[in-house]
Image: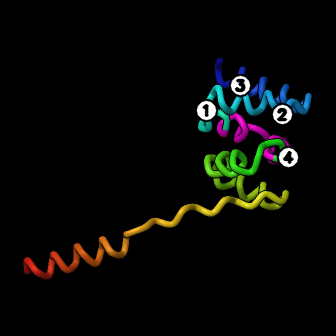
């Protein structure tokens, strides 16, 4: 299925409020392709699609959407999911600085 066909299938599922079809499109074409199809929609249509997804899928799609669309969606009541914190960064930096000082 081409991107245009996925876009058409997404809109058809949305117009018919066919939630199982939305889930099937997400499962079949994967998160990146599904998110790209949602990103090509207007913010209102994207919000409608997201409102039909379970919270976990909604957050996953939101993480793949462009920042300007996420900002538009915030005005419609969709908060951007919080990114997972990067762990061990400071410890790694401290270790590398200590290692550098030891070799100096």
Judging from the image, what secondary structure is the residue with disc 2 in?
Answer: helix
Where disc 4 sits, the SS reads helix
Q: Is residue 57 left or right of residue 50?
A: left
Circle 1 crowding by C-alpha within 10 Å: few under 14, some 14–19, many from 20: few
* Magenta highlight range: 35-50
Could you tell me residue 85's position as x and y percent? 51, 66
Q: Which residue is mark 2?
A: 19
> Colour scheme used in the picture?
rainbow
Q: Is residue 36 magenta?
A: yes
Residue to which mark 4 is pinned: 44
Real-space Cα distance between discs 4 and 1? 22 Å
Mark toward the start of the polypeptide (4 vs 1): 1
> What separation in Å lies between label 1 and label 2 (alpha carbons)?
16 Å
Kindly indicate the quadrant of the structure image that contains residue 26. top right
Secondary structure at numbered mark 1? helix
Secondary structure under tag 3 reads helix
Q: Is residue 96 above or below residue 64?
A: below
Residue where numbered disc 1 is placed:
30
Residue nearer the viewer, 54 or 33: 54
Q: Which mark is residue 6?
A: 3
């Amino acid at each position: 299925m081409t991107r245009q066909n996925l876009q058409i299938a997404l809109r058809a599922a949305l117009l018919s409020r066919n939630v199982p079809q939305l889930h099937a499109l997400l499962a079949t074409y994967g998160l990146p392709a599904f998110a790209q199809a949602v990103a090509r929609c207007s913010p209102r249509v994207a919000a409608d699609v997201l409102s039909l997804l379970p919270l976990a899928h909604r957050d996953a799609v939101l993480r793949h959407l462009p920042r300007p669309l996420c900002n538009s969606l915030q005005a419609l009541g969709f908060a951007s999911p919080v990114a997972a914190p990067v762990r061990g960064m400071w410890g790694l930096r401290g270790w590398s600085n200590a290692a550098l000082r030891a070799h100096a």
